[in-house]
Amino acid sequence: SARLFSRRVTAALLPSSQVLPPSCGGAAAAAAGGGCWRPPMLCASFSAGTTTEPVDGYDSSPSCPPGSKIKGARLEWSDKVKMKLRRRASFRWERPPRKVLFVKKIRERDVAAKAREMAEWLLNRGLEVYIEAEAAETGTFPASCKVWNPRDEAACDVDFGVVLGGDGTLLHFADLLGEAEYFRRVAIDAEQGASESGRVETPLPPCISFGMGSLGFMTNFQVEGYEKVLAKVVEAGEADEEIFCTLRTRLECMVKRKQGTIKPIYSCLNECVIDKGQHPGLGKMGLLVDGKPVTTVQGDGLIISTPSGSTGYNLAVGGAMVAPSVPCMLLTPIAPSTLSFRPVIIPESSKIKVSIPYSARTDGRAIFDGHKMEVLRHGESILVETSSFPIPVINRSPYDQDWFKSIREKLQWNVRVEQKPLPAH
């Protein structure tokens, strides 16, 4: 129910010596007779403002039509890209929002008091406010709030989310949306008689997070003055102000048992960790990327992280920090038994399989965003790929400015006393 607008792209002609990969015009361009765009190449640079062309975020053509050219050759894309590379956008409602899912940090009195105040503000604006069953039982929220149920299609059809707490609360919110996706798949399978879960083409609602937790790396707004911020979000489309957001990548994880059965899909906003569990010995697992063996992981485990999760567990074990708008996944070993096993970054279109070989001395364990866990026996594996639908997180500022502000102020990135200038002669 919201329309995304990409940041405006201005093109500058490059010299013929600086040849860049061609940009695919997609099925629409091919149908028009243009096929893929040809040299001379254009270098895209970003400037403030928005285009008037809506960005759907998805690539409907699985491969680029023949006709793409590099010198002396024709291109056909190998990757079946689910999403376009763009992640930074602003949005406006196509119709006024009606339903809100409100998720707060539990067992905090000051958070509970502020949550009630914010929920009353939303109700007074004519919005339906949905809360979790556990929160409803505490009596924190007004009685007119409705209970959110991941199995109820009408309740799950919310327009945006409000998160009050810390990063863990935002992860919990993303997990709730993942639950709703799973039950929607189950319902479709039962209706169609499908043996395997099919994709449910339902984009996720945007969410706005207010920091009342410990670190709050991903909570972009302060709770003081929430009225002005929420009013701006609710009225997006009516006013001229832009509502900035980043489409944050999620992972879809499936557990494959020995018998070949697939366990439920877990969605992760931060990371999927595969480790040796509680066993004291050396862990061992096979790593495949895009169906091809890459290496054998020997150590405590492996982290498969999104850019959002790069500043969490991934960073603690030596992985790189990656801006949330970068379309990629990170593979970071945990205490590897070789010094040469360094973290790597791979395309988000890759499909990853991590298996516990029969030669391993221990079983394995998969942990999803620190909330859910699955034991992996010998011969079992986990399949990980990028979800077709990212979670749109509302930002204070355009581009990755919020992220840079967080790593400077909350992680103290490159904070030091500046070097003094040379004395004047």
Image (tube, helix red, strand yellow):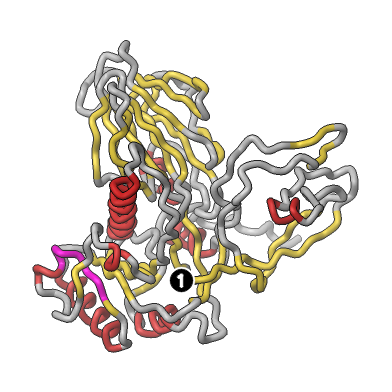
Question: Few, some or many C-alpha atoms within 10 Å of disc 1 (few <14, some 14-19, many ≥20)?
Answer: some
- Closer-to-camera residue (299/65): 65
Q: Where 328 falls versus 378 (above or below)?
A: below
Q: Mark 1 points at which residue?
A: 1
Q: Position of residue 151 (x, y in %)?
A: 24, 57
Q: Where is residue 386 in the image (x, y as percent from the top left)?
A: 47, 44
Tell me if I can see residue 167 in this picture. no
The part of the chain drawn in magenta is: 129-135
Question: At x 60% / y 51%, what residue is drawn?
Answer: 59
Q: Quadrant of residue 195?
A: top left
Q: Say which quarter of the image contains residue 122.
A: bottom left
Compared to residue 130, the image places residue 33 above or below, namely above
Residue type for callout 1: Ser
Asked if residue 244 lies left or right of residue 193, the reply is right
340 or 61: which is nearer to us? Answer: 61
Residue at the far top in the pictured view: 359
The residue at the far bottom in this view is 124
Drawn side of residue 304 relative to residue 291, left or right: left
